[in-house]
Amino acid sequence: NDIYKVVTGKKGIFRTKLSYLVNTSPGRKDLRLMDWDGFRSMKVVSKGLTSSHSWSQNGKYLIYSTERNRKWKIYLLNLKRYRETVLFSSRGLNLVGGTSPDDLISLSSSKDGSSEIYVINIYGKGFKKLTRSFGIDVSPVFSPDGSKIAFVSDRGGSPQIYTVYLNGRGLKRLTFEGSYNTSPAWSPDDKWIAYAGRKNGKNQIFMLKSDGTDLRQLTFIGNNESPSFSPDGLFLAFDSDRDGRRGIYIMRIHGEEQRRITPKHINAMSPKWSPYLK
């Protein structure tokens, strides 16, 4: 990292990590951590069916949604003490989205019927509803400065990517190509949003500018989902079944040098790249 910074003037990703899910048995997914290149994998959560997950901006916590005893709760895991606390619990499906620089957490919840977008702080307080629609709103992620949220909604008839300011104003639809677009991820420099979109019956990774222009397709083989930017904005992690069994891959943000970093004997998915870690 130090040599890379001297040569390029930028921080390196060599001390970053990826959180990801492994399907271990029917009804169970474990949450694991590994180095950015796939080495030193370790299990951190192995109870229940873990789904969406995210890093805190300081890299000290993992926030994740797990179904245990038929209840979906959002948990906070202290990565130093490995102590788990319940952050949010209610009826319905509750899924964490992302985190902001000022310790807000975005989530979707169907506690009142249809799924809507909410925010809450890292202490489990300040619960606030952001969206109100007749459709389903899910997968909320913050812009780098925390002023906007990108999310998925079927309010227009099919799942598409939208953005909205944190005050609930300025709603804008970004995606118009394809009838099924999900899993938005915002680049650290605020320029790009990557997402998974269905094309010719397969899910592929796409990227467009955060204003909705300059659409680019990055993957073409197999089903590819769950993009996540590296903290320097130069790489994307994603999952793919192109080798038969789903695994974690990384590539440069314009699609070059795609390679698998998890073993082929495990079924791995949903990578989330950490921030810079100390």
Image (spheres, rainbow, N blue to C red):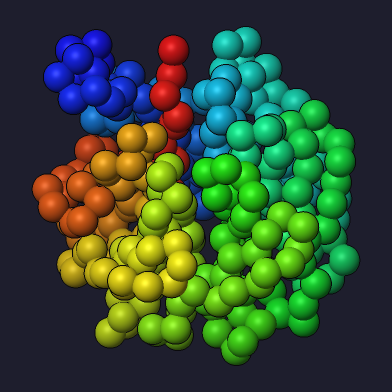
Q: Position of residue 238 (x, y in %)?
A: 33, 51
Can residue 62 be seen?
A: no
Query: Which residue: 77% across, 36% down?
Result: 121
Residue lying furthest left = 257
Query: Which residue: 39% across, 57% down?
Result: 192
165 above or below 162?
above
**How many discs mark residues in the rendered view?**
0
Question: Quadrant of the image for the C terminus?
Answer: top left
Q: Position of residue 14 (x, y in %)?
A: 27, 22
Q: Position of residue 196 (x, y in %)?
A: 39, 66
Query: Which residue: 28% across, 57% down?
Result: 240
Q: Does residue 51 appear to the left or right of 276 in the view shown?
A: right
Q: Position of residue 37 (x, y in %)?
A: 24, 30
Q: Does residue 153 appear to the left or right of 196 in the view shown?
A: right
Q: Which quadrant of the structure image shows residue 194?
A: bottom left
Residue lying furthest bottom = 157
Question: Quadrant of the image for the N terminus?
Answer: top left
- Relative to the observer, which residue lies in front, 46 or 97? 97
Q: Which quadrant of the structure image shows residue 24?
A: top left
Can residue 144 be seen?
A: yes
